[in-house]
Image: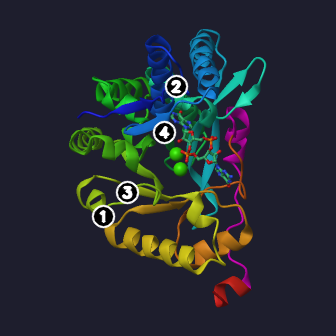
Amino acid sequence: FVTWSCGVVVYPRDGTDVHTLLKHADTAMYAAKEQGHNHYAFYDPSMSVQVTEQLALRDELRLALEQDQFEVHYQPIIDAQTGEVGSAEALLRWRHPQRGLLSPTQFITVAENSGLIAEIGRWVLDQALDTAAAWQAGADGAVTMHVNVSAHQLRQDGFVDEIRTLIADSGLPSSVLDLEVTESVLLADAERAEVLLAELKAIGVRIALDDFGTGFSSLSYLKHLPVDMIKIDKSFIDGIPLNVRDCALVDAVLTLGARLDHSIVAEGVETEQQRDWLVTHGCRYLQGFLFSRPVPRAAFLSLCQQRFDVAPSLEASIGF
Ligand code: C2E
Ligand code: CA
Ligand code: CA
C-alpha cells in the first residue's frame, strides 16, 4: 500500500534558488503529512516554525517516557439498564512540566509519526490492565477496559502476541480488554485489518468501532469485521434531541446495532435531555461528562462503587 504526501513551492515567492525552494518544499511536505496520508500543502513561512515545534515535541515525548510524565485517566461507561459502571475507557494524559495536563489530541500525531506510539501504547495497555485488575477485585460482575489503539500499533509485527502476553500477565480473562479502533485505521489497510481483528477475536479480546459515523462508515465493515461494539461519535449526540437529522441517524444506528447484535455506546453525553432520549430509544451504554469526566485511577475506582441516575424522566418516556 503506497500513500503520498506532497509539498508545493512557488517561484519566486517561496525562494529564488534551488536550495531554498527544495528546503521549503520539504517543510510543506511535512505539514501535508501532519494532515494524514494523501494530502498536499503549499508552503507558508509559518510552517517552518511548526516543523521546528514538531521536532521539539518529539524530543520532549521521548523524555516524557523516560521521566514517567504520562498518566492514564479513566472515564466510566454507564450501563443504562442498571446505572452501574460496567466498562471504562482508558485515556492517555501527559503531565507536561511547563504546559500542564495535555490531552492526546495535542501530541498523538507526533507520537504516531515518530513511532513512539508503539512504546507509549504498550505502557497504556499495561496501566489499563493493572487498573482493571484492581477494579475487578472489588466488583461483583465482569469488568471491561477499553483501550484506544492507533494504526501504527496495529501495523506492528507481533502486536497480537504482545496483547496475549499482557493479558496473561494480568491474570484476567481476555474478554476484559476491548480495543477501540476507528474506521480510518481500518480503512488504511482493510485486508490486513480484517486478519488482525480476527486474530484478536480468536484470543478473546473485544473490538469496538470508535467515532462511528465520522469516517467512511461502510456497511461492508459491519458485514466483514468481527466488531462487538459501535461507539456513536459525539458529533451526532450533540444534536439530540432537537436536530431531526441527528436523531434519525442515531436511531438508525441503534436499530442496526440491535439487529446485528452489536452493543452501542453513545459518546459525549453531556445533558439529561440527551441521556433521556438515548435511553428511551434503546441505547444501553452511555459515556460522557454528564456522568463523569475522565479521572485518575484512584478517583475512578471509587466512582465504580457508585450507581448513576439513568431513569428517563416522565416526560421523556411519554414524549419524543
Ligand atoms: P476518543 O477515543 O474519541 O475519546 C473520547 C474523547 O472525548 C476523550 O478526549 C474524552 O475526554 C472526550 N469526552 C468524553 N466525554 C465527553 C463529553 O461529554 N464532552 C466532551 N466535549 N468530550 C468528551 P481525550 O481524552 O482528549 O482524547 C482524545 C483522543 O485521543 C481520543 O478520542 C483518542 O482517539 C485519542 N487517545 C486517547 N488516549 C489514547 C491512547 O492511549 N492511545 C491512542 N492511540 N490514542 C488515544
Ligand atoms: Ca476511543
Ligand atoms: Ca470516540
Dividing the picture into quarters, in which one does residue 242 lie? bottom right
Separation of marks 1 and 3 at Cα, in angstroms: 9 Å
Highlighted range, magenta: 295-314
Q: Which amino acid does label 2 sit on?
A: Pro
Q: Are marks 1 and 3 in contact (CB under 8 Å)?
A: no
Count every numbered label the image shows and give the total: 4
- Name the quarter showing ligand 1: top right
Secondary structure of the residue carrying numbered label 3: loop
Q: Residue 216, which numbered label?
A: 3
Separation of marks 2 and 3 at Cα, in angstroms: 40 Å
Q: Nearer the viewer, mark 1 or mark 2?
A: 2
User: Percent from the top left, x then y, of residue 307?
Assistant: 70, 58
Q: Earlier in the sequence, mark 2 or mark 4?
A: 2
Secondary structure of the residue carrying numbered label 2: loop
Q: Which of marks 4 and 1 is in front?
A: 1
Q: Nearer the viewer, mark 1 or mark 3?
A: 3
Q: Residue 12, which numbered label?
A: 2
Q: Nearer the viewer, mark 4 or mark 3?
A: 3
Q: What residue type is labelled 3?
A: Phe
Q: Earlier in the sequence, mark 4 or mark 1?
A: 4
Dot 1 corresponds to which residue?
219
Q: Do the residues labelled 4 and 1 touch (CB within 8 Å)?
A: no
Q: Residue at x 69, y 48 (%)?
A: 305
